[in-house]
Image (spheres, rainbow, N blue to C red):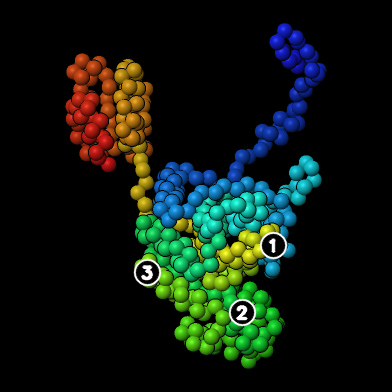
């Protein structure tokens, strides 16, 4: 089969190709059973509608707190994501998806947003600080899956870059607290400090504080005896018992005895009171990511162990390619987890317009309704099928548009929940649908 390209008045044969039918290839395609890849998922109504409604709430409060949207590539150079760019090895880093392009470059899918900030600041050194950014997008982890653990999820981040005060940390927590309040979720905000953790561990003279922190981070998954047994590989029994006993002390003890980092938690506690949220000091809170340098926080639902968000201060990450330290703090959470817990009104299509051979008038009415921000669907077909379709979508109203409506200049508006019918003028119809839910 000749492939011909025409350009103005010239015709050129580019190449000669032959198409062959392959029974074996056809058979292979016929045997393929399409399904989603393990660890990935589809979202259909009403779940997809709920996700959209929750996302709308999230973005509303992000903007109310002055955070500005940022978008970054899904794919980055693998060198940017590798754990040797961080102080310690992180689980999230090791579970990244690795790729290679045609040029042989090592690439990968982003596993979070925070590590990208160092590149952003390097390539945009004139960004006015403090920079308040938010980002919502897909991230990927090549990790074991479960009913609540997926390889792709939607991450939501807010960060304040270039501000070192605990007030900036309180701003992030206040923003997320307002989101949870709007979604009718009661939070339990737990806070610790990385410097305090190191200070406590060093006070009992355990040589490898990083290893201790990684073990403490498993307390939600493993029991305390198992954690203590693991710690015996790097510490003796007396050190471990002293460590756990010390970590049961209240925050005031660490402030009074000048443990590094304790005062920062106290300042955040005071700042939180001004915003109307309360934090709980949890000295066992570790959070695995190694880039945290100060206060760290984890938000759980009251009465539950699983967290819905986490974050903290990471002053040594953002400026590393600029050769200087830039203070930064932020909070991150997954849309999927938040959506599953949220109580939110799901917007629905309000009315179905049923055209009885009056297509032009029906389209004109639909345009006027949509201009007034009333969602509607046009159905060109039998009324019975239209009503079945409307019921399947839980549409509240139906408008019938036929010869009688044209003649009387009235529309029959039917409430599909109560069965009540009314004859209304075009203006009355538009106003009624605009003013009611």
Give me the residue at 73% from left, 63% from top. Answer: 84
Marks 2/1: CA distance?
Answer: 25 Å
Q: Is residue 259 left or right of residue 416?
A: right
The residue at the point 73 percent across, 55 percent down is: 79
Image coordinates of residue 100 in percent, x first then y, are: 75, 47
Give the spatial CA distance, label 3 vs label 2: 29 Å
Which is nearer the eye, 48 or 80?
Answer: 80
Residue under the point 59% across and 45% down? 36
**Front: mark 3 or 1:** 1
- How many numbered markers are drawn? 3
- Disc 3 residue crowd, few under 14, some 14–19, many 20+, Cα 10 Å: few
* Residue 194 position within the rendered picture, expressed as x and y whole percent measured from the top left: 58, 74
Q: Which residue was labeled with disc 3?
A: 274
User: Secondary structure under badge 2?
Assistant: helix
Kind of element beneath mark 1: loop
Quarter containing the C terminus: top left
Mark identifier at residue 323: 1
Q: Badge 1: few (under 14), some or many (20 or more) residues near its Cα, within 10 Å?
A: few
Quadrant hosting residue 4? top right
Q: Looking at the image, is mark 3 or mark 2 earlier in the sequence? A: 2
Q: Residue beneath label 2, please? A: 198
Q: Earlier in the sequence, mark 3 or mark 1?
A: 3
**Foreground tag (2 vs 1):** 1
Which is nearer the eye, 382 or 349?
A: 349
Residue 274, image x and y in percent?
37, 69
Q: Quadrant of residue 342?
A: bottom left
Between 64 and 224, the one lying in front of the other is 64
Residue occupying the point 75% across, 9% down? 10
Q: CA distance from mark 3 to mark 1?
A: 36 Å
């Amino acid at each position: 089969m000749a492939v011909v390209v025409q350009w103005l008045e010239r015709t050129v044969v580019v190449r000669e190709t032959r198409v062959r039918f392959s029974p074996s290839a056809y058979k292979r395609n016929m045997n393929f059973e399409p399904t989603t890849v393990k660890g990935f998922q589809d979202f259909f109504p009403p779940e997809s509608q709920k996700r959209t409604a929750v996302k709308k709430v999230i973005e509303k409060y992000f903007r109310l707190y002055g955070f500005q949207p940022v978008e970054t590539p899904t794919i980055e150079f693998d060198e940017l994501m590798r754990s040797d760019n961080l102080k310690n090895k992180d689980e999230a880093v090791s579970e990244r998806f690795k790729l290679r392009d045609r040029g042989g470059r090592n690439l990968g899918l982003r596993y979070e947003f925070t590590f990208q900030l160092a590149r952003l600041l390097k390539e945009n050194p004139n960004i006015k600080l403090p920079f308040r950014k938010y980002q919502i997008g897909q991230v990927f982890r090549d990790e074991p899956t479960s009913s609540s653990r997926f390889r792709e999820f939607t991450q939501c981040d807010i960060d304040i870059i270039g501000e070192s005060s605990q007030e900036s940390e309180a701003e992030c927590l206040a923003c997320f607290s307002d989101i949870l309040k709007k979604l009718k979720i009661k939070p339990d905000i737990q806070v610790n400090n990385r410097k305090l953790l190191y200070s406590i561990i060093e006070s009992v003279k355990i040589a490898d504080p990083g290893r201790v922190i990684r073990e403490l981070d498993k307390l939600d998954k493993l029991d305390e005896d198992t954690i203590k047994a693991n710690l015996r590989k790097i510490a003796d029994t007396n050190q471990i018992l002293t460590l756990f006993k010390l970590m049961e002390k209240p925050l005031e003890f660490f402030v009074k005895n000048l443990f590094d980092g304790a005062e920062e938690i106290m300042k955040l506690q005071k700042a939180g009171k001004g915003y109307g949220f309360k934090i709980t000091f949890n000295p066992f809170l570790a959070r695995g990511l190694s880039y945290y340098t100060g206060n760290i926080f984890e938000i759980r639902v009251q009465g539950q162990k699983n967290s819905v968000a986490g974050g903290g201060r990471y002053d040594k990450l953002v400026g590393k390619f600029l050769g200087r330290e830039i203070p930064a703090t932020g909070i991150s959470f997954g849309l999927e987890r938040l959506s599953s817990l949220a109580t939110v009104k799901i917007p629905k299509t309000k009315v179905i317009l049923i055209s009885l051979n009056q297509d032009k008038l029906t389209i004109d009415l639909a345009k006027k309704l949509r201009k007034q921000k009333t969602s509607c669907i046009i159905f060109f077909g039998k009324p019975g099928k239209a009503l079945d379709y409307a019921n399947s979508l839980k549409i509240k109203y139906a408008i019938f548009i036929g010869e009688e409506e044209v003649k009387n200049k009235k529309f029959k508006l039917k409430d599909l929940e109560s069965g009540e019918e009314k004859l209304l003028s075009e203006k009355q119809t538009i106003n009624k649908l605009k003013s009611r839910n």
